[in-house]
Image: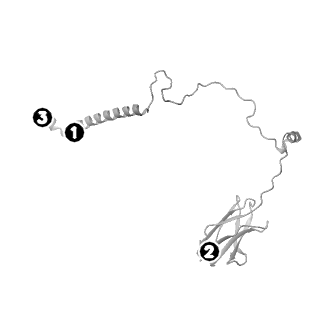
């Protein structure tokens, strides 16, 4: 027996390394040819300038002068004094006072159908009601409105609460700010 036949593991490793080197070389050559054909990669212009096909060229930096004027001019406010009031009155038309937006309460429900005894999520917005305490009211089957034993506080112009009733039929909910005599829209939920 010869030396090469005595070491089959070493022979296998040498063959494996030889195949890996050949496959690596072939893959590298294929990659280089592919990038040249597709035009991918940096071109060696040799002169340090942009290569053919490149589109981004940055200009050389240059010094700029600093502006002494403000870049934004603000309108004078009411508290600047009488001088600015007379100056602005001659240059600009008088601004009309905008009417305050109408205070209103908007209510939404978490579901249109619910089972008796199931919690119902009510939420809404009340932009002019920061800190107000709203009374929840209920109306069963188109009857009269009655106070429900739940109050809700307005915080950040929003409010939310859960209500629960064992009654069945078409039930409407609304919230009321009694201090401002303001009522929300009614939301209808079918129970049963």
Kind of element beneath mark 3: loop
Relative placement, left or right, of 47 versus 104 is: left
Residue at the far left: name it.
1
- How would you rate the neighbour count of disc 3 (Cα within 10 Å): few for under 14, some for 14-19, many for 20 or more? few
Q: Does label 3 or label 1 sit earlier along the sequence?
A: 3
Measure how far apart labels 3 and 1 are at the Cα level. Answer: 16 Å
Q: Position of residue 160 (x, y in %)?
A: 66, 64
Image disc number at residue 190: 2
Q: Say which of 148 and 59 sits in front.
A: 59
Q: Which residue is depicted at the point 77% across and 57% down?
A: 101
In the structure shown, which secondary structural element does the residue marked by tag 2 occupy?
A: strand
Residue at which label 1 appears? 12
Q: CA distance from mark 1 to mark 2?
A: 80 Å
Question: Dot 2 surroundings within 10 Å: few (below 14), some, or many (20 or more)?
Answer: some
Number of numbered labels in the structure image: 3
Residue 103 image offset from top left, x and y in percent: 76, 61
Which of the marked residues, 2 or 3, is nearer the chain's N terminus? Answer: 3
User: Residue 165's quadrant in the figure?
Assistant: bottom right
Q: Which residue is mark 3?
A: 2
Task: Give the spatial CA distance, label 2 vs label 3.
Answer: 95 Å
Q: Residue at x 68, y 63 (%)?
A: 124
Direction from residue 1 to residue 11 in the image, left or right? right
Q: Which mark is residue 84?
A: none
- Callout in the foreground (1, 2): 2
Q: Quadrant of the C terminus?
A: bottom right
Image quadrant where residue 123 sits: bottom right
Res. 2 image quadrant: top left
Mark positioned earlier in the residue sequence (1 or 2): 1
Asked if labels 3 and 2 touch by Cβ distance under 8 angstroms, the answer is no
Q: Are marks 1 and 2 in contact (CB under 8 Å)?
A: no
């Amino acid at each position: 027996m010869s030396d090469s036949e005595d070491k089959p593991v070493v022979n296998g490793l040498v063959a494996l390394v030889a195949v890996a080197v050949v496959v690596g070389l072939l893959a590298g050559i294929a990659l280089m040819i592919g990038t040249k054909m597709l035009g991918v990669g940096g071109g060696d212009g040799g002169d340090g300038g942009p290569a053919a096909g490149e589109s981004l060229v940055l200009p050389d930096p240059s010094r700029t002068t600093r502006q002494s004027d403000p870049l934004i001019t603000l309108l004078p406010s009411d508290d600047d004094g009488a001088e600015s009031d007379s100056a602005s009155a001659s240059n600009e038309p008088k601004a009309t006072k905008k009417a305050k937006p109408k205070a209103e309460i908007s209510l939404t429900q978490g579901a249109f159908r619910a089972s008796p005894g199931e919690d119902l999520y009510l939420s809404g917005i009340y932009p002019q009601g920061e800190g107000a305490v709203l009374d929840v009211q209920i109306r069963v089957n188109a009857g009269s409105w009655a106070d429900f034993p739940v109050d809700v506080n307005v915080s950040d112009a929003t409010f939310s609460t859960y209500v629960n009733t064992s009654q069945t039929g078409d039930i409407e909910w609304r919230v009321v700010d009694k201090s401002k005599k303001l009522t929300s829209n009614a939301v209808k939920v079918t129970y049963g």
